[in-house]
Amino acid sequence: MPESLTGLQVISFESRLRHETAGLLEKHGARVLSAPALREAPLSEIPEAKAFAEAVCDGEIDVLVLLTGIGASLLLKAACNYRPRAELVLGLSKLILVSRGPKPSSALKPFGLRPTFSVPEPNTWREILRKLDAESPVAGRSVWIQEYGTRNLELIHALGTRGAQVRSVHVYSWTLPEDTAPLKAAILKIVRLQAHVAVFTTALQIDHLLWVAQEIGMAAAVRRALNRDIVVASVGPVTSEALERHGIATDITPGHPKLGHLILAVARRARGLLSEKREYDAPLPGTARIGK
């Protein structure tokens, strides 16, 4: 129902798909505040690219785990600066290539490669382990991981306990946006209960939101509002786990960790959940009346 979010103030912390996310929410009647919490900062030089290229071509890698599409593409292109493309492709074709979903698989296509296997939804590190355990145990093997943002310590540890020799390749990082004014405006709306729904699409968004909130002395108030009065929507289990680490419960998680599924879940469930969390029908100052 396109009117299901009518009158609700929804905050989106998405950066890369900022306009697409806002547009989808607005189709359901939401008033959207876009407050990007991240800025992608590809490394101008990838220090590990040379070592990676040499290891691929010299047969020193057994398993390559690709966690993101952009990161996989950047890594492979950077490696071409150090070894001929044809030599790299030949070396990669001999590896067990593990794709965390469809995006890394797409990054392999320009090189004429396909993943050995792609892990199923919800595409977390746990699915990667289950797939490897079932189809290609890593004991005694050299496993390289194309990282993103922060290191996936759980995956690294789990592979190590299985007897793998693990190395991470850090390709790009996430930083705060250059303009944090929209993020601070979102924080104020949250603590003043002028927002009704907060939509998180990556784990680092909550880290950055609370970091900025701490800087302006509002971190505790943000946590309290998100738990008591704001409907918290998460795109999938990785993001939900990050929220949980900060003591914030997730109210909505879609059956599939995709943006479209998330927006539909928010449209269908946010109004009822909001009534349950606030437990009264009186309209908030400056907002439309929220009925049960």
Image (cartoon, rainbow, N blue to C red):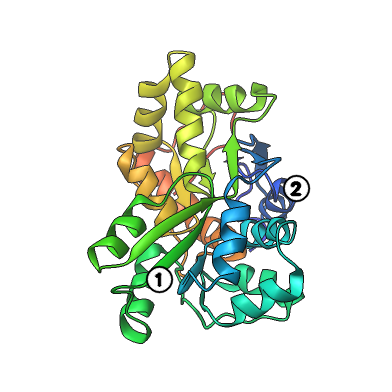
Tell me which numbered mark, 1 or 2, is placed earlier along the sequence: 2
Identity of the residue furthest to the left in this view: 161
The residue under label 1 is 128
Q: What residue type is labelled 1?
A: Ile
Direction from residue 193 to residue 112 in the image, left or right: right
| Vertical position of residue 263 compared to residue 278: above or below | below
As measured in the structure, the alpha-carbon distance from the residue carrying label 1 to the one carrying label 2 is 31 Å
Image coordinates for residue 271, horizontal then vertical, percent: 49, 50
Identity of the residue furthest to the bottom in this view: 135
The residue at the point 38 percent across, 43 percent down is: 243
Is any part of residue 283 visible from this angle?
A: no
Image coordinates for residue 222, horizontal then vertical, percent: 42, 27
Q: Residue 19 carries which label?
A: 2
**Label 2: which secondary element:** helix
| Crowding at mark 1 (Cα within 10 Å: few <14, some 14-19, many 20+) | many
Q: Quadrant of residue 159?
A: bottom left
**Label 1: which secondary element:** helix
